[in-house]
Amino acid sequence: MTDEQRRDSLADQAAAWVPPWDRPRPPATEDTPTPLDESAAPPDTEEPGADEPQHVEVASEEAASTSEEAASEEVTSAGPDLGGVTKGTAGESGDAGDVPRRQQAGRRRVTAAPEPAPELSDTELRGALEAILLVVDEPVSELVLAQVLEQPAERVGPMLDEIAAGYTTAGHGFELRRAAGGWRLYTRPEYATYVERFVLDGQSVRLTQAALETLAVVAYKQPVTRSRISAIRGVNCDGVIRTLVTRGLIEECGTETDSGAFLYKTTTLFLEKLGLNTVDELPPLAPFLPDDVEELADATR
């Protein structure tokens, strides 16, 4: 074959070539599978209701999901004994990971309400109060006693009054008295001589005249600064104030706004030693003041 004949043969072949998408399809047989052509329309011979199994399958999946959610919620609301869903308890799959996270986040742990404390009888309440009051080292309030005994404060207050009245009627050498905002047992004043003889045993713990004067100024003028105390007494009171602070009768309670000096006030121990409930029970000073007190006050300014 010459070159010219070869070129004519190639030209004839190119002219006779048909693209694959234009070529006629071979007839389908049982042994030869029909190629899938997405661009082709579905055949007219498709049986009606062919998509129904798909809808049934989707519906069954939704029903299964709903049943799993219901089972998970039932397990969650079972009570405080179910601390969480473990393997084999959430659905038939036996895997806790099958439970959706939104269900796990929405779970609420149910806790049982604490049982109220049993109410004590009057005899038990009296005995418990007396036992506590025997060991306290400072007055204790009715609220603290009610919290310790887990009883209403409305019962504790009247019971303390009843106990105090009973001690007084029986003529005991001690009494239950309210002092410094609380309750505490004290020896009776008529037996103070014997108590002092036993406790002191010849020791003197009395305050000096200067300490008593300074303590009185603090009690009636509190809160007050050192300079104000010294101005009222007319002498320097630094040493006496240190003594009163050491004995726990006065304490610092902040600073003055203008000068920044420390302020002093009486303590709970001061009220306890004097048998007072508040500083408002201090006797008035008016009967003990001189007639020209205003003139003296103006002179010291």
Image (spheres, rainbow, N blue to C red):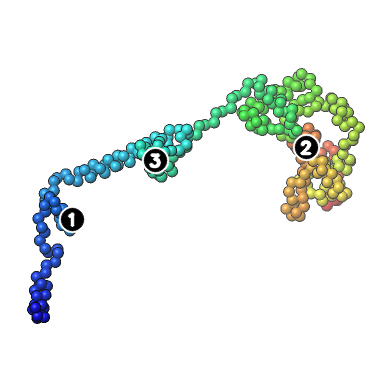
Q: Position of residue 47 (x, y in %)?
A: 13, 46
**Which residue is pictured at 40% across the width and 43% down the height?**
97
Q: Amino acid at mark 3?
A: Asp
Q: Is residue 6 above or below residue 34?
A: below
SS type, badge 1: loop
Which numbered marker is on residue 36? 1
SS type, badge 3: loop
Task: Measure the C-alpha gap from mark 2 to mark 1.
Answer: 101 Å
SS type, badge 2: helix
Res 163 quadrant in image? top right
Instruction: Name the front one of labels 3 and 2.
Output: 3
| Residue at the limit of the structure toward the front, as seen here | 1
Q: Which residue is mark 3?
A: 95
Q: Position of residue 258 (x, y in %)?
A: 74, 54
Res 99 quadrant in image? top left
Q: Amino acid at mark 1?
A: Leu
Res 164 quadrant in image? top right
Q: Earlier in the sequence, mark 3 or mark 2?
A: 3
Instruction: Name the front one of labels 2 and 1.
Output: 1
**Which residue is pictured at 9% across the width and 80% down the height?**
2
